[in-house]
Image (spheres, rainbow, N blue to C red):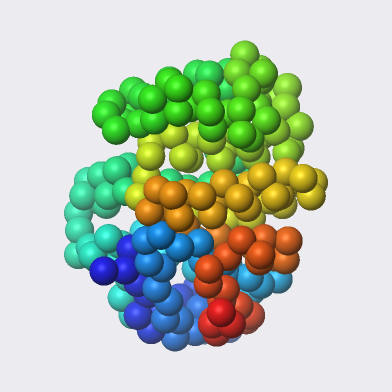
Amino acid sequence: MEAIELHRVGKVYGKGVSKVTALHDVSFSAPAGQLSLVVGPSGSGKSTFLTIAGGLQTPTSGQVLIDGHDPATMTAKQRDHLRLTTLGFVLQSYNLHPSLTVADQFTLVDRVKKEGNLSKQELATLLAELGIADLIDKYPGQLSGGQRQRVAIARALYPNPTIVLADEPTAALDRPRVAVVGQLMQDLAKKYGKAVVVVTHDQRLTPFADRIARIEDGRLTMEK
């Protein structure tokens, strides 16, 4: 079974002269054990695609299945539970709590999801791989954009989700860090059997991908 499936999904914002179609009849699937890239320029519909794939938005038409479940048929509480236990999001905005240190960002996750998170040793290994182990006592405001991005990646992976959805995870990173993140995403898929979907304009990630789709003007086509 595919971890994520989109069947002829469309998304329309506004009405009348303000109507904008962000996605046109998009079909897509992401199997466990593979890294899927959705590549496209700014304004192509990448972020809309990702939020719909992760159940954060409801499509105007079509169907989305996450781990076999249709978020449109679930209650708000059931959708929240699905996202908490199944999905890990890496968003462009980082979503780090400004008044918490890096270490406390993970403690906050423990309060919300009390079981199934990475062990202390696994977290330490992850932080070391991302080059942020020495930043655990820093606040987000004390970090560079690239450092905040890597902390956001680590926090998304800490709950040990089965599906990882990332929105431009390498936008603020230099080439060596892009390679680290690309390899990390590939390892999550290959070694740990997770479905990893990355939307990006960063062509430097393509060597790490099993599957590549291109999205332009809300229309998606498979390239690999």
Q: Quadrant of the C terminus?
A: bottom right
Where is residue 165? Give x, y as percent: 48, 55
Q: On the rendered structure, is 58 left or right of 20?
A: left
Where is residue 123? Give x, y as percent: 48, 27
Q: On the rendered structure, is 99 left or right of 171?
A: left
**In the rendered image of this protein, does residue 13 appear above or below residue 3?**
below
Where is residue 88? Give x, y as percent: 43, 46
Q: Which residue is nearer to you in this view: 97 or 191?
A: 191
Q: On the rendered structure, is 113 left or right of 220?
A: left
Q: Quadrant of residue 59?
A: bottom left
Where is residue 221? Give x, y as percent: 55, 84
Residue at (73%, 61%) from the top-left corner?
Answer: 204
Residue at (38%, 84%) from the top-left corner?
Answer: 8
Q: Residue furthest right?
A: 174
Q: Quadrant of residue 108?
A: top left
Residue at (38%, 25%) from the top-left corner?
Answer: 119
